[in-house]
Amino acid sequence: MRCLFCKADSSGSKSREHIVPESFGNSDHVLGPGIVCDGCNNYIAREVEKPILDSLYFRERRFSATIPNKRGRVIPLEGLHLQSRTRVQNHADDLTGEGVSIGAHPDADEARFIKSLLGDWSHTLIFPMAVAPENRALARFVGKVGLEALAHRLIQANLSHEELVDKSELDALRSFVRRGSGPRHWTIARRQLYLPDKVFFDGKDHYQMLHEFEIFFRPVDEVNQLYECYVSLVLFGEEFVLNLGRPEL
Ligand SMILES: [Zn+2]
């Protein structure tokens, strides 16, 4: 078996690859061992997924949706209480999303924080406004999801992902994701499809959509059967679209 990213023999690899990271609430869409080799799996977790998961933008969204990380903890947001000049943390009290609590951080400042709260009627809490991660980090992440989603689609159709390993059309994106090499800018289209907390109803159950993804083919030259391949990734209602074949949409 060969790795989707580095093309090396991956027969001995053991790790399973989450197409969308677990910390975005994904437990269903997983590639089996060897589709992505252990080395690439490690590299991608560290260099491609972590910068996105750790970005304030997605931490805020994960917090709002009370999605725990791999260790089962919802990462708090950090802010400032203006009157006491205390750094504070906004904690999700439980995983039901029913409440949040605010406390001083570090705990040693709690007394000063509370004293200020008791002494005044009016208070201001400041939380930094999150802007989306820069293009390159985001594009590498969406590109990774795209390549893996395409492999997933083949496997679901009882085909081998190795067909993709030999596709030179995917090499530019492969090395962009795996080595950070290639163009400075890989275009992404973004739009809010639905609100992050929108509740869907399928006739039986109510549910929220944390993520979804799909692969699309757009005919470029139907006579010669040439297609462009796009991935659409939706996280918390926001859609990110990327062309798997070249950096332009
Ligand atoms: Zn590899």
Image: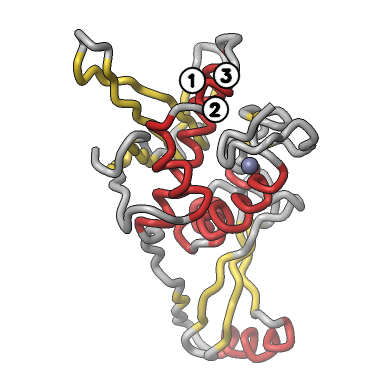
Q: Is ligand 1 within 8 Å of the beta carbon of the residue shown at mark 3?
A: no
At mark 2, the secondary structure is strand
Q: Would you place residue 52 above or below residue 217 in this image? A: below
Q: Which mark is residue 207?
A: 2
Q: Dot 1 corresponds to which residue?
A: 201
Q: Which mark is residue 247?
A: none
Q: Position of residue 239 (x, y in %)?
A: 36, 38
Q: Position of residue 141 (x, y in %)?
A: 48, 47
Q: Residues within 10 Å of mark 2 (few under 14, many from 20)?
A: few
Q: Amino acid at mark 3?
A: Asp
Report the image quarter containing ligand 1.
Answer: top right
Viewport quadrant of the C terminus = top left
Q: Position of residue 46 (x, y in %)?
A: 62, 57
* Apparent side of residue 49 relative to residue 124 in the rendered image (left or right): right
Q: How is the image coloured?
A: secondary structure
Labels 2 and 1 touching (C-beta < 8 A): yes
Labels 3 and 2 touching (C-beta < 8 A): yes
Determine the CA span between mark 3 and mark 2.
6 Å
Determine the CA span between mark 2 and mark 1.
6 Å
Q: Would you place residue 45 above or below residue 228 in this image? A: below
Q: Amino acid at mark 2?
A: Tyr
Mark 2 vs mark 1: which is more N-terminal?
A: 1
Viewport quadrant of the N terminus = top right
Residue 193 in view: no
Residue 29 in view: yes
* Apparent side of residue 190 relative to residue 154 in the rendered image (left or right): left
Q: Dot 3 corresponds to which residue?
A: 205
Please give the name of the residue rendered at 39% of the width and 42% of the height, measured from the top-left corner. Answer: 172
Q: Position of residue 133 (x, y in %)?
A: 41, 59
Please give the name of the residue rendered at 53% of the width and 49% of the height, measured from the top-left corner. Answer: 178
Labels 1 and 3 touching (C-beta < 8 A): yes
